[in-house]
């Protein structure tokens, strides 16, 4: 596994390898999810923030069928904190990306 994140004077460089994803927020809070590639951006007004580098082969949360209990796949929520209230209020975490990997054994042919 190899990932690289470099941030210097407004320049953000991200490189993720196969089976990895990078979740990035731009200065206007748009969210990008990059897989198996690289990304370079210069923030003139604001900065690009790398919220997470995710190994998609080892997502932590198991998704189970409620009836059979069979594992259907795995998922991960990527959160970004934001303070939307008064200046003295606590920051809240908001889900900005939800990554799923579904089990391949669930494909049925008839």
Image (cartoon, rainbow, N blue to C red):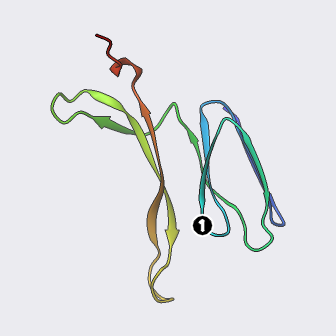
Give the mark count. Answer: 1
> To which quarter of the image does residue 42 belong?
bottom right
Q: Please, is residue 33 above or below residue 89 in the view?
A: above
The residue at the far left in this view is: 67
Q: Is residue 40 left or right of residue 107?
A: right
Tell me residue 106's x, y (percent). Answer: 33, 21
The residue at the far top in this view is: 110
Task: Please give the residue where the numbered disc 1 appears in the rendered image.
Answer: 29
Tell me residue 103's x, y (percent). Answer: 39, 25
Tell me residue 52's x, y (percent). Answer: 59, 51
- In the image, 57 versus 40, the foreground residue is 40
Q: Please, is residue 20 above or below residue 108 in the view?
A: below
How many residues crowd around disc 1 within 10 Å: few (fewer than 14), some, or many (20 or more)?
A: few
**Residue at image location 76% in from the left, 74% down from the top:** 45
The residue at the far front in this view is: 110
Tell me residue 62's x, y (percent). Answer: 35, 36
Numbered disc 1: secondary structure: loop
Q: Is residue 8 left or right of residue 20?
A: right
Q: Is residue 22 left or right of residue 13?
A: left
- In the image, 62 versus 102, the foreground residue is 102
**Residue at image location 73% in from the left, 72% down from the top:** 46
Quadrant location, the N terminus: top right
Quadrant location, the C terminus: top left
**Residue at image location 53% in from the left, 35% down from the top:** 56
């Amino acid at each position: 596994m190899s990932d690289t994140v470099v941030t210097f004077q407004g320049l953000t460089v991200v490189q993720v390898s196969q089976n990895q994803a990078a979740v990035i927020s731009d200065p206007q809070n748009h969210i990008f999810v990059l897989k198996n590639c690289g990304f370079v951006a210069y923030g003139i007004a604001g900065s690009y923030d790398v919220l997470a580098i995710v190994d998609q082969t080892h997502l932590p949360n198991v998704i189970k069928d409620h009836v059979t209990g069979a594992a259907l796949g795995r998922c991960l929520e990527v959160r970004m904190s934001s303070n939307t209230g008064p200046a003295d209020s606590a920051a809240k975490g908001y889900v900005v990306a939800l990554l799923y990997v579904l089990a391949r054994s669930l494909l049925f042919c008839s």
